[in-house]
Amino acid sequence: MFQYSTRALSSIYILIFFSSCSTKTISDDGDWELVWQDEFEGDKLDRSNWTFDLGTGAPSFKEYGHSSPYFVPENFPSDNFSVRWEGEIKIDYNTEYTFYLISDDGVRLYINNNIIIDSWEPQPATEKQGVIKLQKDKKYSIQIEYFEQTGGEAIVLGWESEKFSKRLVPSSHLFTPSEEPGLTGTYFKNKDLKQSATERPLVRIDKEINWITGGGWGNNESQYYTDRPQNVRIENGKLIIESHKESYRGSNYTSSRIKTRNSWKYGKFEIRAKLPPGRGTWSALWALPTDWEYGNWPLSGEIDIMEHVGYDEDIIVTSLHNAALSAGNIGGTDQHGYLKQPNACEQFNSYILEWTEDAIKIIVNDKVSLQYLKQDKNWAKWPFDKRFHLLFNIAVGGNWGGAKGIDDGVFPSRMEIDYVRVYSRTGIKGT
């Protein structure tokens, strides 16, 4: 990994120093050996050690081109609504057409009054398809029904045939009843496609059906993650992750979510950090499975070494997620820890994960926040026997971070990380 440079030699000397010293373990049964670290020396982030999650967390379907993040009409609810699009579609060839709808939650597609897609799948957005044979130089009726429950919104209409590859259905082939390009969309403030007794639905012409809004990484967050120096950089020997109030690619805030290229199975992980202040920030030092061998989240687990929301600056939350308990149902269990840490945003504190094949312990400085024992647990309660990698980020808003709103006056708000150190009893390095 290292090249022969001044920085590399410094890193080697540091490694020799830590390896030759007696490093006391948080546990009572032996020493740990330093196997990986980043002290954030120099003036640039070492991208051989780190990579990034970018964007909004919304899925990307490149065959259909660029999807707009601006879907919901102004002053219209973003959850629990439905839309019906109606019009005609022009056909150029005698052949079978495969139609595609990308959506989250519920969707139906009718062509020539035949229902060819009928699906209800909650988040995340997925692609559905249906096949129908159509005739050249004809127009057929088309109707799309979309049902949005919660989270980000996604609705994309595509097609393909033996004559052309998968692509977006363009406005040149869609017509409203009045022969304008596109389809007539009727937007209802309920999930039943029903007009309110007191309020008319909103009606507009949509030239193309092609929206994927920010999924907010599953938490309705408001930021766009970048790897720009404005959002993530090395400064005075610290890793800086900084969130900003700015319009960027359809989002109103920017930040960064950085993760290790290395992965580890068991070890002691120490991160020394100063946390970001301000109502609306939601920072985390955490770990996710690298291979997802037990399935998608939460089946393969999640380890939250530290979570912190800016409206509760002195509180540190630690938690474990698995198939048995996840998200909002872990409170009051042995998978959840909660402690007060005064000055968490003014001074550096050590956040430590000690993870062995028998137990997980999370410590803030010298205080144990969480201890979870494997005992005779099966994979659903103990998916923590596979490789994990580290992630650090500041989210903005979201289900938890934005529960009391966002104070735009707190930005820019930064998290500073002094160092990251990984230890092992076996000497096995990350992969």
Image: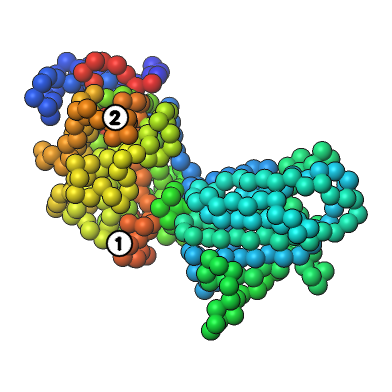
Q: Give neighbour class at mark 2: few <14, some 14-19, many 20+ (Cα, 10 Å).
A: few
Rendering coords of residue 318 (x, y %): 23, 44
Of circles 1 and 2, the one toward us is 2
| Residue 53 placement, left or right of 333 | right
Above or below — where is 232 with respect to 21? below
Mark 1 or 2, nearer chain start: 1
Could you classify mark 1 by the number of other residues whose Cα lies within 10 Å: few (under 14), some (14-19), or many (20 or more)? many
Look at mark 2 in the image and give the residue it sits on: 378
Circle 1 residue: 279
| Left or right, 276 with reference to 3 | left
Image location (x, y in percent) of residue 218: 43, 50
Above or below 245: residue 35: above
SS under mark 1: loop
Q: Quadrant of the C terminus?
A: top left
Q: Quadrant of residue 108?
A: bottom right
- The number of discs equals 2
Camera sees residue 46: no
Residue 115 visible here: yes
Q: In the image, residue 292 lies at what x, y percent?
A: 42, 31
- x%, y% of residue 271? 24, 36
The front one of 219 and 195 is 195
Q: Secondary structure at mark 2?
A: loop
Q: Nearer the viewer, residue 166 or 228?
A: 166
Q: Quadrant where the N terminus lies?
A: top left
Kind of residue at disc 2: Asn
Going by the numbered disc 1, the residue's amino acid type is Arg
The residue sitting at 50% across, 56% down in the picture is 152
Q: CA distance from mark 1 to mark 2?
A: 39 Å
User: Seen in the image, is 85 located left or right of residue 372?
Assistant: right
Task: Tell which of 252 and 268 is nearer to you.
Answer: 268
